[in-house]
Amino acid sequence: MPGWLERANPPPKGVSPSVTLVVFLRGINVGGHRSFRPSLLARELSDYDVVNIGAAGTFVVRKPGARDKFRAALTRKLPFEAEIAICHARDIIQLEEDDPFAGEPARDDLTRFVSILSKSGKVPARLPVAIPERGEWFVRIIAAQHPFVFGEYRRHMKTIGYLGKIDALFGAPATTRTWKTIQSIVRILQPLE
Protein backbone atom coordinates (compact mmCIF):
# COMPACT_ATOMS: atom_id res chain seq x y z
CA MET A 1 0.00 0.00 0.00
CA PRO A 2 1.25 3.53 -0.64
CA GLY A 3 2.20 5.69 2.33
CA TRP A 4 -0.40 7.51 4.38
CA LEU A 5 -0.80 10.92 2.77
CA GLU A 6 -2.89 13.90 3.76
CA ARG A 7 -6.12 14.09 1.76
CA ALA A 8 -6.07 16.78 -0.93
CA ASN A 9 -9.71 17.82 -0.49
CA PRO A 10 -10.57 19.99 2.51
CA PRO A 11 -12.77 18.37 5.18
CA PRO A 12 -16.20 19.71 6.20
CA LYS A 13 -16.07 22.95 8.17
CA GLY A 14 -15.06 22.13 11.74
CA VAL A 15 -13.73 18.68 10.80
CA SER A 16 -10.02 18.22 10.29
CA PRO A 17 -8.60 14.83 9.32
CA SER A 18 -5.41 15.81 11.14
CA VAL A 19 -7.24 15.99 14.49
CA THR A 20 -10.48 14.05 13.95
CA LEU A 21 -10.36 10.55 15.41
CA VAL A 22 -12.20 7.34 14.63
CA VAL A 23 -12.90 5.04 17.58
CA PHE A 24 -13.62 1.31 17.39
CA LEU A 25 -14.88 -0.57 20.46
CA ARG A 26 -14.37 -4.31 20.52
CA GLY A 27 -17.07 -6.91 21.19
CA ILE A 28 -19.95 -4.51 21.72
CA ASN A 29 -23.56 -5.67 21.15
CA VAL A 30 -22.48 -9.10 19.89
CA GLY A 31 -24.73 -12.03 20.76
CA GLY A 32 -26.45 -10.12 23.56
CA HIS A 33 -23.21 -9.57 25.49
CA ARG A 34 -21.91 -6.18 26.63
CA SER A 35 -24.97 -4.49 25.22
CA PHE A 36 -25.56 -0.78 25.32
CA ARG A 37 -26.77 2.01 23.04
CA PRO A 38 -23.82 3.68 21.28
CA SER A 39 -26.08 6.57 20.20
CA LEU A 40 -26.61 7.47 23.87
CA LEU A 41 -22.87 7.32 24.52
CA ALA A 42 -22.30 9.69 21.58
CA ARG A 43 -24.80 12.13 23.12
CA GLU A 44 -23.07 11.89 26.51
CA LEU A 45 -19.80 12.79 24.77
CA SER A 46 -21.33 15.68 22.80
CA ASP A 47 -18.63 18.10 24.03
CA TYR A 48 -16.27 16.15 21.75
CA ASP A 49 -18.68 16.27 18.77
CA VAL A 50 -19.03 12.49 18.57
CA VAL A 51 -20.94 10.85 15.71
CA ASN A 52 -22.15 7.28 16.22
CA ILE A 53 -22.00 4.84 13.30
CA GLY A 54 -24.19 1.76 13.72
CA ALA A 55 -24.54 -0.47 16.79
CA ALA A 56 -21.05 -2.02 16.96
CA GLY A 57 -19.33 0.82 18.83
CA THR A 58 -17.85 2.88 16.00
CA PHE A 59 -17.55 6.65 16.41
CA VAL A 60 -16.17 9.66 14.58
CA VAL A 61 -14.82 12.19 17.10
CA ARG A 62 -14.59 15.63 15.48
CA LYS A 63 -13.27 17.60 18.46
CA PRO A 64 -11.29 15.15 20.58
CA GLY A 65 -8.87 17.64 22.11
CA ALA A 66 -6.03 15.83 23.86
CA ARG A 67 -6.25 12.16 22.88
CA ASP A 68 -5.54 10.84 26.39
CA LYS A 69 -8.17 13.12 27.90
CA PHE A 70 -10.76 11.98 25.37
CA ARG A 71 -9.89 8.30 25.94
CA ALA A 72 -10.33 8.80 29.70
CA ALA A 73 -13.72 10.47 29.17
CA LEU A 74 -14.83 7.65 26.87
CA THR A 75 -13.69 4.99 29.33
CA ARG A 76 -15.59 6.67 32.19
CA LYS A 77 -18.81 6.75 30.16
CA LEU A 78 -18.68 3.11 29.04
CA PRO A 79 -20.90 0.81 31.13
CA PHE A 80 -18.17 -1.89 31.12
CA GLU A 81 -14.49 -2.35 30.27
CA ALA A 82 -13.84 -2.54 26.55
CA GLU A 83 -10.86 -2.76 24.24
CA ILE A 84 -10.57 0.58 22.41
CA ALA A 85 -8.78 1.19 19.11
CA ILE A 86 -8.33 4.82 18.05
CA CYS A 87 -7.15 5.98 14.60
CA HIS A 88 -6.67 9.34 12.96
CA ALA A 89 -9.37 10.11 10.40
CA ARG A 90 -6.73 10.79 7.75
CA ASP A 91 -5.61 7.15 8.01
CA ILE A 92 -9.15 5.88 7.47
CA ILE A 93 -9.59 8.21 4.48
CA GLN A 94 -6.30 6.95 3.06
CA LEU A 95 -7.45 3.35 3.51
CA GLU A 96 -10.29 3.85 1.10
CA GLU A 97 -8.12 5.77 -1.36
CA ASP A 98 -5.50 2.99 -1.34
CA ASP A 99 -8.25 0.30 -1.43
CA PRO A 100 -6.52 -2.89 -0.28
CA PHE A 101 -9.17 -4.90 -2.13
CA ALA A 102 -8.59 -3.29 -5.53
CA GLY A 103 -8.08 -5.91 -8.20
CA GLU A 104 -9.79 -8.60 -6.09
CA PRO A 105 -13.19 -9.50 -7.53
CA ALA A 106 -16.02 -9.22 -5.01
CA ARG A 107 -17.88 -12.44 -4.24
CA ASP A 108 -21.38 -12.78 -2.82
CA ASP A 109 -20.33 -15.49 -0.37
CA LEU A 110 -17.46 -13.44 1.15
CA THR A 111 -17.39 -10.29 3.29
CA ARG A 112 -14.40 -7.97 3.12
CA PHE A 113 -13.18 -6.68 6.46
CA VAL A 114 -10.62 -4.53 8.23
CA SER A 115 -9.38 -5.40 11.70
CA ILE A 116 -7.84 -2.58 13.72
CA LEU A 117 -5.09 -3.49 16.17
CA SER A 118 -5.37 -1.55 19.44
CA LYS A 119 -1.61 -1.74 20.08
CA SER A 120 1.57 -2.65 18.24
CA GLY A 121 1.73 -6.23 17.12
CA LYS A 122 3.66 -8.43 14.74
CA VAL A 123 2.99 -9.23 11.11
CA PRO A 124 3.01 -12.92 10.15
CA ALA A 125 6.00 -13.98 8.06
CA ARG A 126 3.80 -14.82 5.08
CA LEU A 127 0.54 -13.43 3.79
CA PRO A 128 -2.08 -14.43 2.81
CA VAL A 129 -2.99 -16.55 5.81
CA ALA A 130 -6.02 -18.84 5.90
CA ILE A 131 -7.83 -19.63 9.15
CA PRO A 132 -8.01 -22.55 9.70
CA GLU A 133 -4.86 -23.45 7.80
CA ARG A 134 -6.17 -26.85 6.71
CA GLY A 135 -9.46 -27.65 5.04
CA GLU A 136 -11.99 -25.01 4.11
CA TRP A 137 -10.99 -21.57 5.40
CA PHE A 138 -13.47 -19.24 7.08
CA VAL A 139 -11.18 -16.20 7.44
CA ARG A 140 -8.42 -15.18 5.05
CA ILE A 141 -5.95 -12.39 5.84
CA ILE A 142 -4.68 -10.84 2.60
CA ALA A 143 -2.59 -7.85 3.80
CA ALA A 144 -1.55 -5.83 6.83
CA GLN A 145 -0.40 -2.23 7.33
CA HIS A 146 -0.21 -1.38 11.03
CA PRO A 147 -2.65 -0.87 12.66
CA PHE A 148 -4.85 -2.36 9.94
CA VAL A 149 -5.34 -5.99 8.92
CA PHE A 150 -7.29 -6.70 5.72
CA GLY A 151 -9.13 -9.83 4.81
CA GLU A 152 -12.33 -11.57 3.93
CA TYR A 153 -14.53 -14.07 5.68
CA ARG A 154 -17.20 -16.55 4.77
CA ARG A 155 -20.68 -15.97 6.14
CA HIS A 156 -20.94 -18.88 8.56
CA MET A 157 -21.67 -19.50 12.26
CA LYS A 158 -18.03 -20.54 12.86
CA THR A 159 -16.58 -17.32 11.46
CA ILE A 160 -16.75 -15.24 14.66
CA GLY A 161 -14.54 -17.75 16.45
CA TYR A 162 -12.01 -17.69 13.64
CA LEU A 163 -11.97 -13.87 13.56
CA GLY A 164 -10.90 -14.07 17.22
CA LYS A 165 -7.71 -15.83 16.12
CA ILE A 166 -6.45 -12.60 14.52
CA ASP A 167 -5.35 -11.49 18.02
CA ALA A 168 -2.94 -14.41 18.38
CA LEU A 169 -1.77 -14.19 14.78
CA PHE A 170 -0.77 -10.51 15.16
CA GLY A 171 0.01 -10.52 18.89
CA ALA A 172 -2.39 -7.68 19.66
CA PRO A 173 -6.12 -7.22 20.35
CA ALA A 174 -8.03 -6.56 17.13
CA THR A 175 -11.51 -5.26 16.50
CA THR A 176 -13.14 -5.97 13.15
CA ARG A 177 -15.42 -3.96 10.88
CA THR A 178 -16.68 -4.72 7.39
CA TRP A 179 -15.22 -2.80 4.47
CA LYS A 180 -18.69 -1.29 3.98
CA THR A 181 -18.50 0.18 7.49
CA ILE A 182 -15.10 1.71 6.67
CA GLN A 183 -16.63 3.23 3.53
CA SER A 184 -19.51 4.64 5.64
CA ILE A 185 -16.98 6.27 7.96
CA VAL A 186 -15.20 7.84 4.99
CA ARG A 187 -18.49 9.28 3.70
CA ILE A 188 -18.97 11.00 7.07
CA LEU A 189 -15.43 12.35 6.89
CA GLN A 190 -15.63 13.57 3.29
CA PRO A 191 -16.35 17.23 2.54
CA LEU A 192 -19.98 18.25 2.45
CA GLU A 193 -21.18 19.00 -1.05
Image (cartoon, rainbow, N blue to C red):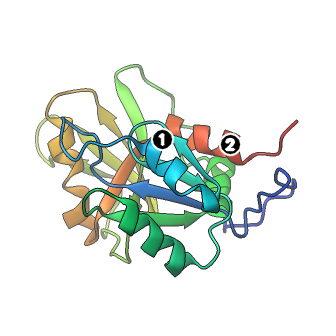
Q: Earlier in the sequence, mark 1 or mark 2?
A: 1
**Residue at (18% x, 35% y) in the render:** 31
Q: Quadrant where the C terminus lies?
A: top right
Q: Give, as a three-letter code, the residue at label 1.
A: Ser
Horizontally, is 191 left or right of 104 in the view?
right
Q: Nearer the viewer, residue 113 or 182?
A: 182
Estimate the spatial distance between the alpha carbons at disc 1 and disc 2, rounded to whole Å: 16 Å
Q: Quadrant where the N terminus lies?
A: bottom right
1 or 2: mark nearer the eye? 1
**Residue at (56% x, 76% y) in the render:** 67
Horizontally, is 60 left or right of 139 in the view?
right
Identify the residue position indicated by label 2 in the image. 188
Q: Nearer the viewer, residue 185 or 45?
A: 45
Using the rendered view, name the quadrant where residue 127 is placed. bottom left
Question: Height in image: 124 above or below 192?
Answer: below
**Residue at (38% x, 42% y) in the render:** 56
Badge 1 marks a residue whose secondary structure is helix
Badge 2 marks a residue whose secondary structure is helix
Q: Nearer the viewer, residue 127 or 27?
A: 27
Instruction: Look at the image and tell me whether residue 62 can be seen.
Output: yes
Mark 2: few/some/many CA within 10 Å (<14, 14-19, 20+): some
Instruction: Look at the image and tell me whether residue 1 can be seen.
Output: no
Horizontally, is 83 left or right of 149 in the view?
left
State yes or no: discs 1 and 2 in contact (Cβ < 8 Å): no
- State the image coordinates of residue 57 (x, y, percent, origin top left): 41, 48
Q: Nearer the viewer, residue 189 or 125?
A: 189
Give the farthest residue toward the top: 108
Give the label on residue 39, or none: 1
- State the image coordinates of residue 32 (x, y, percent, origin top left): 19, 36
- State the image coordinates of residue 139 (x, y, percent, origin top left): 26, 42
Q: Give, as a three-letter code, the residue at label 2.
A: Ile
**Residue at (81% x, 58% y) in the render:** 14
